[in-house]
Image (cartoon, helix red, strand yellow):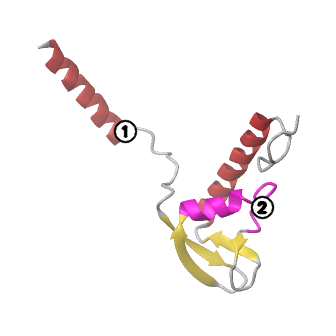
């Protein structure tokens, strides 16, 4: 009897969290985003994770005025079409780079190689 009561309480808690839980979750990295290459006005659809990885691989903070490199022109002009989503993504990636730099103790941008101590 106690087991069924506990199972019911856990089921209710899980259901409540699903309905009313944290709605500010990060977007799924396998989800698709529309990227606009501002130099050619071409739009492409790609996975968010691929876009974010390209931005994270570059040294230094992510510049909101520059995006991923357009393969046709070699200009860093690819940004998420939704401006609010782009702003949130840049802020998130820059926070990740700052945290990586602080954790590594390198004082760099999070892209530095292993410490040579």
Residue 20: mark in rendering: 1
Answer whether residue 74 is magenta in the image: no
Answer whether residue 51 is magenta in the image: yes
- Check disc 2: other Cα within 10 Å, few if <14, some if 14-19, many if 20+: few
Residue 22 in the image, given as x and y percentages of width and height = 45, 40
The quarter of the picture where the N terminus appears is top left
Q: Nearer the viewer, mark 2 or mark 1?
A: 2
Task: Using the numbered discs, state the Cα–Cα distance from disc 2 to disc 1 in whole angstroms.
Answer: 35 Å
Secondary structure of the residue carrying tag 1 is helix
Nearest the eye: 46 or 25: 46
Which residue corresponds to mark 2? 63
Relative height, residue 7 to residue 116 (above, below) = above
Segment tinted magenta in the rendering: 48-66
Give the farthest residue toward the right: 117
**N-term mark: 2 or 1:** 1
Give the farthest residue toward the left: 1
Contact between labelled residues 1 and 2, with CB atoms less than 8 Å apart: no
The residue positioned 48% from the left and 55% from the top of the image is: 28
Residue 26 in the image, given as x and y percentages of width and height = 52, 49
């Amino acid at each position: 009897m106690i087991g069924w009561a506990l199972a019911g309480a856990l089921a209710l808690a899980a259901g409540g969290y699903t309905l009313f839980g944290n709605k500010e979750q990060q977007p799924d990295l396998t989800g698709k985003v529309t990227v606009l290459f501002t130099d050619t006005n071409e739009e492409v659809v790609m996975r968010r994770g691929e876009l974010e990885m390209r931005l994270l691989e570059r040294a230094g903070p992510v510049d909101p005025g520059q995006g991923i490199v357009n393969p046709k022109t070699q200009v860093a002009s690819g940004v998420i079409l939704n401006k609010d989503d782009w702003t949130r993504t840049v802020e998130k990636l820059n926070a990740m780079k700052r945290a990586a730099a602080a954790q590594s103790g390198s004082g760099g941008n999070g892209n530095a190689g292993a410490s040579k101590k």
